[in-house]
Amino acid sequence: GTVRTLSVQVTREEVRDGAESYVITLDDITDLVIAQRSTAWGDVARRIAHEIKNPLTPIQLSAERIQRRYGKQINQDDKTVFDQCTDT
């Protein structure tokens, strides 16, 4: 009831009297295919995470600069909203 992935190789041998014989090799590569698929998905996830993080770092640095530069100039009534916006 389990699906398996097999690698099949067929080799033909010729005997001197003109007869032919074949050697058939079956290799179970199910675990190899699963490992390759897992590695491929890991690579996709790593690339997606990099692309998501890439633009976020400059945005975060800009928000921190704004907070340092203008944080002291904001009056107390607006300070909570300013902090919340730059933290977000």
Image: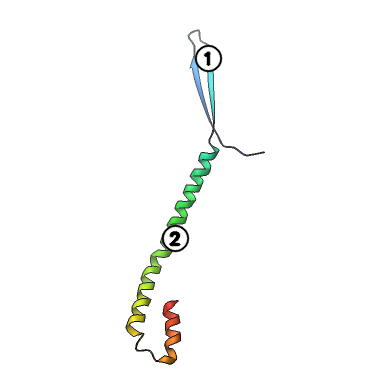
Task: Decide if residue 21 is on the left or right side of residue 78.
Answer: right
Residue at image location 32% in from the left, 82% down from the top: 69
Vertical position of residue 16 compared to residue 29: above or below: above
Residue position for label 1: 20
Dividing the image into 4 quarters, which one contains the N terminus?
Answer: top right
Asked if the residue at tag 2 contacts the one at tag 1, i.e. Cβ–Cβ closer than 8 Å, the answer is no
Residue position for label 2: 49
- Under mark 1, the amino acid is Glu
Disc 1 versus disc 2: distance between alpha carbons?
Answer: 56 Å
How many circles with numbers are drawn on the protein?
2
What secondary structure is found at the residue carrying circle 2?
Answer: helix
Q: How crowded is mark 2: few (under 14 residues within 10 Å), some or many (20 or more)?
A: few
Q: Where is residue 55 in the image (x, y as percent from the top left)?
A: 39, 67
Residue at image location 35% in from the left, 89% down from the top: 73
What secondary structure is found at the residue carrying circle 1?
Answer: strand
Q: Position of residue 14 (x, y in %)?
A: 49, 14
- Under mark 2, the amino acid is Ala
Dividing the image into 4 quarters, which one contains the C terminus?
Answer: bottom left
Which image quadrant is residue 78 in?
A: bottom left
Q: Residues within 10 Å of mark 1 (few under 14, many from 20)?
A: few
Sooner in the amino-acid sequence: mark 1 or mark 2: 1
Vertical position of residue 15 compared to residue 74: above or below: above
Q: Nearer the viewer, mark 1 or mark 2?
A: 2
Residue nearer the viewer, 12 or 73: 73
